[in-house]
Amino acid sequence: MKKILLNGLQLGKQNSGVQYYTEYLFNALQQVKSLDFEFNILENDSVKRKDRSSLKRILFEVFLLKFYIKKKHFDLYHSPHYILPNRFKIPAVVTIHDLITLDFPDLCKYQSVFYFNLFLKKTIRNANIIIAVSHTVKKDIIRHFDVDAHKIRVIHLGIDPIFKNTLDFDLAIKYRLPERYILFVGNIEGKKNLTRLLLAFNELINKNKIEHKLVLVGKEGWKNKSVYKTILKYNLKPYILFTGYVPKKDLPVIYSMSDLFVFPSIYEGFGIPPLEAMACGIPVIVSNQGASPEICGDACLLVNPYDTHEMAKSIEMLLNNKELRQNKINLGLERVKQFNWEKTAKETLKVYEEAISI
């Protein structure tokens, strides 16, 4: 039986994005019956790492992890977050979620830009197989690196089945949810384009006199000062609710009790929140950039993320046009059926089989 190691050192108490991918993929792999593979996840306790700082984790992954893998006799290593160890010997798979640090470095942490510029090219070259989470990301990888397209496999992510229309008024009171609100879910950071969403919302308040408030769900990210400056400049504080990080189990209610979900990111390599909103029966607006059009199809309204007036018009239209709302809700409920973690795990398992046989 071949021993597979999946790196889970990034997992913590407030998971999002890549961490969700790692957690759900590992859980789904364990549910897949395989006589050929034993699935293991590398967590901080596995290597007695008490210090969880990003820098020390990166140094361990790049320079020391290979010794742990050799000691434990693993047959294949899967990095779910971009980078492989230096001078690696056994078969390896890497998942690339986006190349935003290369295409939009101004939206990223300086440390991340430096890190990926230093190690990503070598990882792309050394990986036996690269998993891209969308065809958009696959094209980006080919555009940036001299890599054979046949080395890349596109495997979409799934969504948790807990996401369905769910009402809970006690939970609404706990989070102080307004009676009517427009919703965003994601880290509060530059690439999410929240400053322009606020400007569009301000236009709706002043010109269209909407009664909704804007609820922003997510933990603090980086390069988000303009978000708070915009709120102060336009006196939007009475209309905005920041919930902070919300546990996954509470999210279905927050989605379900909203009137509309808006996800105006400058770029997403995949983007799970729009699918979660669709699964909860909520109409969705997404950016027409990045992978969002690929993932959401015709189930969402697409907007130019740089055009705040277009964003405001689309929000107003989806709030007021009942026929359009219902059409997008119905299309969304059908669309989400294409994305589940069992499918993701089975396709990933095929990648493991292929990587070991190379």
Image: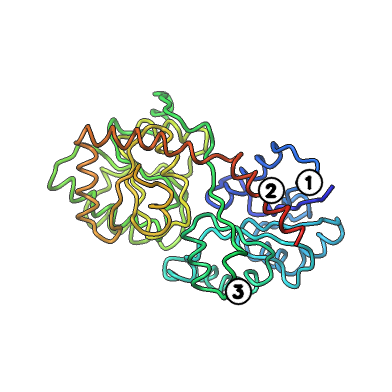
Callout 3 environment at 10 Å: few (<14), some (14 to 19), or many (20+)?
Answer: some
Instruction: Give coordinates of residue 101: x percent, y percent.
Output: 49, 68
Residue 80: image quadrant is bottom right
Q: Amino acid at mark 1?
A: Phe
| Residue on which the image places disc 2 | 349
Counting residues from the start of the chain, the first of labels 2 and 1 encountered is 1
Instruction: Give coordinates of residue 29: x percent, y percent.
Output: 68, 42
Residue 37 is tagged as 1
Q: Nearer the viewer, mark 2 or mark 3?
A: 2
Q: CA distance from mark 2 to mark 1?
A: 9 Å
Query: For this rendering, which residue is in front, 11 or 261?
Result: 261
Q: Amino acid at mark 2?
A: Leu
Counting residues from the start of the chain, the first of labels 2 and 3 encountered is 3
Specify how the rendered protein is coloured: rainbow
Q: Residue at x 48, y 33 (%)?
A: 163
Is label 1 in contact with label 3 (beta carbons under 8 Å)?
A: no
Q: CA distance from mark 1 to mark 3?
A: 29 Å
Q: Residue at x 54, y 36 (%)?
A: 160
| Residue on which the image places disc 3 | 121
Q: Residue at x 48, y 36 (%)?
A: 337
Is label 2 in contact with label 1 (beta carbons under 8 Å)?
A: yes
Image quadrant holding the C terminus, namely: bottom right
Q: Amino acid at mark 3?
A: Lys
Q: Nearer the viewer, mark 1 or mark 3?
A: 1
Callout 1 environment at 10 Å: few (<14), some (14 to 19), or many (20+)?
Answer: some
Can you see residue 346?
Answer: yes
